[in-house]
Every structure is written in C-alpha cells, then in structure tokens.
Image (spheres, helix red, strand yellow):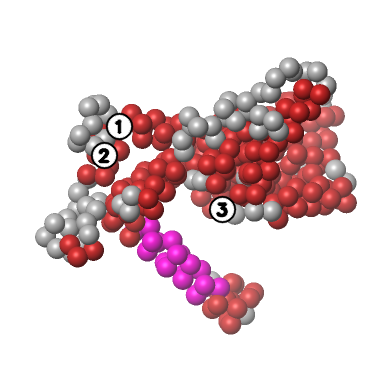
Amino acid sequence: MNYFFKKNGPLISTYFIIAIVFWLIFLIIIPQLYMLDLSFRPNLPPLLRGGPDDVHTLVHYKHFIFGSETSEDAYNYVDIGVFFNTIITAIIVTILNLCFCYPIAFYMAKVAKPNSARLLIVALIIPFWINELLRSFALRILFAGEGVINNILISIGFIDTGINFIAMDIALYTGLTYAYILLMIFPLYNAIESLDTNQLEAAKDLGSSTFRTHWRIVIPHAKAGIASGCTMVFMLTAGALATPVVLSSPNTYWFTQLIYQWFNMNDNWSRGSAYSILLLSVSVVFVLLMMRIFKVKIGEIVR
C-alpha cells in the first residue's frame, strides 16, 4: 500500500481507492445481493411487500425445475432445456473462439513485424466501433435465405437452392463467436507476447515439431491468458441477448430471453432474479473450473 501511494501520489491513489470501492460496493455487491434476496421472495403487489406474506421461499427455483402447479409434466422441460442448450452452446462458442483466436494471437505476438501487428490489431478493433445489434443484423443479411452468401454460392453454381443458415444455427454460432473475439485474442496476445523468443528458437534447434513446441512451451506459458479469455467469452456468450434474438432460429431459445420475459413482459422480478442467479452460478462454476484446469489463481485471470 505504501508503494502504491508513493508511485501514484496521495491524491491519485486516494481517488483510485474510492473509485474502486464505490464500483465494487454500489455497482456489483449491493445489486447482486439485492437480486439474490429478491430471488427468494414471492412476487407480490407493491402494497403487500414487507407484509406477513413477504417471506423467503424457494418457489421460483422450484418453478425452474418442476414448472407451474397446473402443468401436467413432472419437470419444467422447456426452461431446463433452454438453460442447458444455452450453457452447451456457450461452451462450444468458447472452444471455437479459442481455436480461431490462438493462431491469430500467436502470429501477432511472435511472427508479425511490429507495424504489421499494429495494423492487424487496428483491423480487428475497427468493426467493433459498430454496435453489437447492428453487427448482428449485418450477419443476418449475410446468412439469410436470399442473403449475400447464398447468392454467391448460387451464382458460381455451388448450390441450386439457398441454404437456411439461420435455421441450422450456423448464423448464431458465427455471430456469437465473432461478437467476443477481441476478449479472447487480447488476453492470449498479452500472454504469448511475454514468452521469451529464445525458448522457441531453442526448441526448434533441438528438433521439436511445431505442434510439440506449442503444446509444451507456448500453451503452458499462455495458460493464464487462455483461462482469462475462455472465462470472459463464456460468461458474455451465456449472458448474450441481442445476438441470439437476431440470429437464432425460431426453434432456438436463449436463457437470457426467458430472464428478459420474466423481468419485463411478465413483471415478475423475483422469478427473473432467480433465473439470473442460476446463470450467474454457472458462470462462477465455470471460472472455478478454468482455474482448476489451467492451475491458475484468480489474480492471474483478471490481470
């Protein structure tokens, strides 16, 4: 702490501490605690809140598992199915993002010249100046039944009729992978850039193959960046709303859409809070899993 004050000065250091404490307490901790408490309370009219009926209950979590009392099904197959479909899709998108971004990050960090790396970084950043919703609609135009991709494929004779990329969820996977690509590339780039190039040259001189060099040297060194990128991509993908609404097929439903409906359309903030806590819990478990797999501490992930 003394080093922090000496390095930044008393005024700047005090400002940083106040800003961080305010951000943590009022923008993260208090809203999450309020949502957690709300998830255990019944959905009551404003006049009845705080009364004898306003007690803690598990009714909203029971609804997620068993559905409404009038339902003939033993379990709430719809909501449970949407929940697991969202989590599985988020995991697949995270893996796709990692496989796609790792070569790019390695190229920028160890292969490209400084000027080329800067140009590539700028080229990656510029498309994200556009709003995520607009990017999603642009991808929908590309993947539509009469969209750009189908028109090109038909014009060159590759296909006779248009492919329904949206119904096959190809557009959804592409949109989600593209939406958070920077959150995977930059942690990987920062981690790989810190690797001593002499280690790569020594491995090459000793006859190590490219795959073995990456598996034994680069990936272990970049494990903190991999864990950080996977964590951010998974959480944001699972919590996405705009991209799934625009690019998903009519048969594909996203868990955040259920949360949105409970909050805004059904005016049931308690149930919306319960569903949000379920999604948050999975995200926390995923972070812990990444820490366990890559054997890193939380400080290395958020660095």
Give the mark, 3 or 2, whose residue is nearer the N terminus: 2
Query: Could you tell whether 201 is left or right of 148 in the image?
Result: right
Residue at figure coordinates x 42%, y 68% from the top left: 26
Relative image position of residue 82 (x, y in whole percent) = 41, 33
In the image, taking residue 36 as reference, residue 105 lies left or right, namely right
Contact between labelled residues 1 and 2, with CB atoms less than 8 Å apart: yes
Q: From the top left corner, tell me how far across and down residue 154 is, in percent.
A: 77, 22
Q: Is residue 155 left or right of residue 144?
A: right
Residue 63's disc number? 2
Residue extending furthest toward the left? 52
Mark 1 crowd level (few <14, some 14–19, many ≥20, 10 Å Cα): some
- Residue 196 is situated, as x and y percent measured from the top left of the image, at 77, 44
- Residue furthest out toward the bottom: 11
Residue ID at (54%, 40%): 244
Q: Is 20 part of what is drawn in magenta?
A: yes
Q: Residue at x 33, y 53 (%)?
A: 267
Residue 269 is situated, as x and y percent measured from the top left of the image, at 32, 54
Q: Amino acid at mark 2?
A: His
Camera-side residue of 163 and 57: 163
Can you identify the residue that label 3 sits on? 302
Q: Quadrant of residue 283?
A: top left
User: Counting residues from the N terminus, which is met first, the one under dot 2 or under dot 1?
Assistant: 2
Region in magenta:
16-33
Vertical position of residue 175 compared to residue 40: above or below = above
The nearer-to-camera label among 3 and 2 is 2
* SS state under label 3: loop
Quick one: label 2, few (<14), some, or many (20+) residues within 10 Å?
Answer: some
Q: Amino acid at mark 3?
A: Val
